[in-house]
Image (cartoon, rainbow, N blue to C red):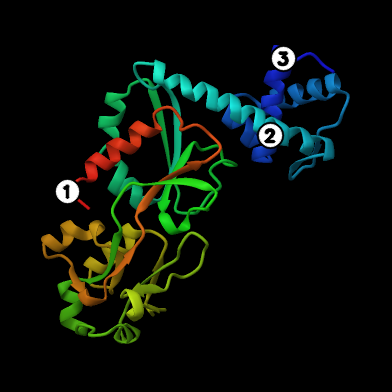
């Protein structure tokens, strides 16, 4: 049995990251080294162990049968190491380290934008990295410590901590549009209106969800414009192009200023809150608990 030397530990970690990312290039970016350095490390590890661990082609990297067995054990072992290190946080005066999270655009604007400066100044030893992406990603495979998403979309095997109260979704239109086209009185009326359609993370067209309980319905609205980003939809709505569907909080200012009006107010829909989610097998990452607390504190009295 090979000795568990410093070199073996380092190379085993490299091997684990390569298996998780299924890419030398992505693993190299995560580890901050070159792909040639990773290739060299893997050759040395396979030579020392006397077993081929990876099958590498021009398009992909997959573990061999031996590699799959090894990485499964490594995940458990490294998970215990992460937990043990995470428990040291209680002995530090302040959290430290890199915290990498993946969030949708609405969360970046509504939850993180207002607090990011405060957080970074309060916890200067945390290096916060925020990646904005409306697609649902596997945060473990992609190398993130945590993510923010709408509660219903988070896989059940992950820990999900609510950041907001349940969310309210509404239909809005500009005074100009409503003057020209009239105001819908019931959900079916939307089929006769110009609507700004939404393409969501799985690349499907989102059906507007209206009402709650037994009255809830979904409408596949028509319209001249399809977007995958809220800002564009709201700009078009304020310009009078059509009706838009969004979070009530997202347009609170525009409604207060009279640039948008709520349409079908009795058909507003309520959904699960935004949540911070992370792998259940890991100790909470240093700084994540503090980030959650800062976000929640900023929402007090707002949501």
Pick out the residue farthest to the left.
257
State left or right for residue 270 relative to residue 200.
Answer: left
Q: Residues within 10 Å of mark 2 (few under 14, many from 20)?
A: many
Q: Secondary structure at mark 1?
A: loop
Q: Which residue is mark 2?
A: 18
Q: Quadrant of residue 147?
A: top left
Q: Gap between marks 2 and 1, in whole Å?
A: 45 Å
How many numbered tags mark residues here? Answer: 3
Q: Nearer the viewer, mark 1 or mark 3?
A: 1
- The residue positioned 18% from the left and 58% from the top of the image is 252
Residue 194: % across, % down? 31, 79
Instruction: First in sequence, mark 3 or 2: give its number.
Output: 3
* Quadrant holding the N terminus: top right
> Which residue in the protein does label 3 denote?
7
Q: CA distance from mark 1 to mark 3?
A: 53 Å
Q: Nearer the viewer, residue 169 or 296?
A: 296
Looking at the picture, how far across and down is residue 180, in whole percent? Answer: 18, 82
Which of labels 2 and 1 is toward the front? 1
User: In percent of the image, x 54 and y 27: which residue is there?
Assistant: 83
Q: Give whichever of discs 2 and 1 has the lower sequence position.
A: 2
Please state which of residues 39 and 293 is positioned toward the viewer in this rendering.
293
Q: Are marks 2 and 1 in contact (CB under 8 Å)?
A: no
Q: Secondary structure at mark 2?
A: helix
In the image, residue 165 above or below residue 293: below
Callout 1 crowding tier (Cα within 10 Å): few <14, some 14–19, many ≥20: few
What's the CA distance linking mark 3 and mark 2?
17 Å
| Left or right: 216 in relation to 154 | left
Q: Is residue 270 above or below residue 280?
A: below
Residue 24: image x %, image y %?
68, 34
Task: Kindly identify which numbered label has been placed on residue 301.
Answer: 1
State the image coordinates of residue 201 (x, y, percent, origin top left): 48, 59
Please name the residue shown 42% across and 73% down the image: 207
């Amino acid at each position: 049995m090979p000795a568990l030397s410093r070199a073996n530990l380092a190379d085993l970690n490299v091997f684990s990251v390569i298996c998780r990312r299924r890419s030398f290039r992505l693993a190299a970016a995560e580890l901050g080294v070159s792909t040639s350095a990773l290739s060299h490390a893997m050759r040395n590890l396979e030579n020392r162990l006397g077993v081929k661990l990876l099958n590498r082609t021009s398009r992909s990297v997959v573990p061999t049968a031996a590699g799959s067995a090894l990485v499964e054990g490594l995940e458990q072992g490294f998970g215990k190491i992460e937990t043990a290190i995470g428990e040291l946080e209680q002995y530090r005066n302040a959290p430290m380290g890199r915290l990498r999270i993946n969030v949708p655009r609405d969360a970046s604007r509504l939850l993180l934008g207002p607090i990011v400066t405060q957080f970074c100044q309060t916890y200067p030893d945390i290096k916060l990295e925020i990646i904005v992406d409306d697609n649902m990603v596997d945060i473990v495979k992609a190398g993130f410590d945590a993510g923010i998403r709408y509660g219903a979309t988070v896989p059940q095997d992950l820990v999900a901590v609510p950041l907001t109260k349940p969310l309210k979704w509404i239909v809005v239109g500009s005074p100009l549009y409503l003057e020209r086209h009239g105001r819908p009185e019931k959900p079916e009326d939307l089929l006769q209106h110009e609507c700004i359609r939404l393409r969501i993370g799985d690349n499907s067209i989102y059906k507007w969800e209206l009402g709650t309980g037994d009255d809830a319905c979904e409408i596949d609205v028509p319209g001249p414009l399809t977007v995958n980003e809220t800002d564009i939809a709201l700009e078009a709505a304020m310009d009078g192009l059509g009706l838009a569907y969004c979070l009530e909080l997202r347009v609170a200012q525009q409604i207060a200023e009279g640039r948008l009006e709520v349409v079908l107010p009795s058909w507003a829909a309520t959904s699960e809150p935004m949540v911070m989610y992370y792998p259940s097998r890991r100790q909470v990452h240093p700084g994540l608990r503090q980030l959650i607390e800062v976000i929640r504190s900023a929402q007090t009295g707002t949501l």
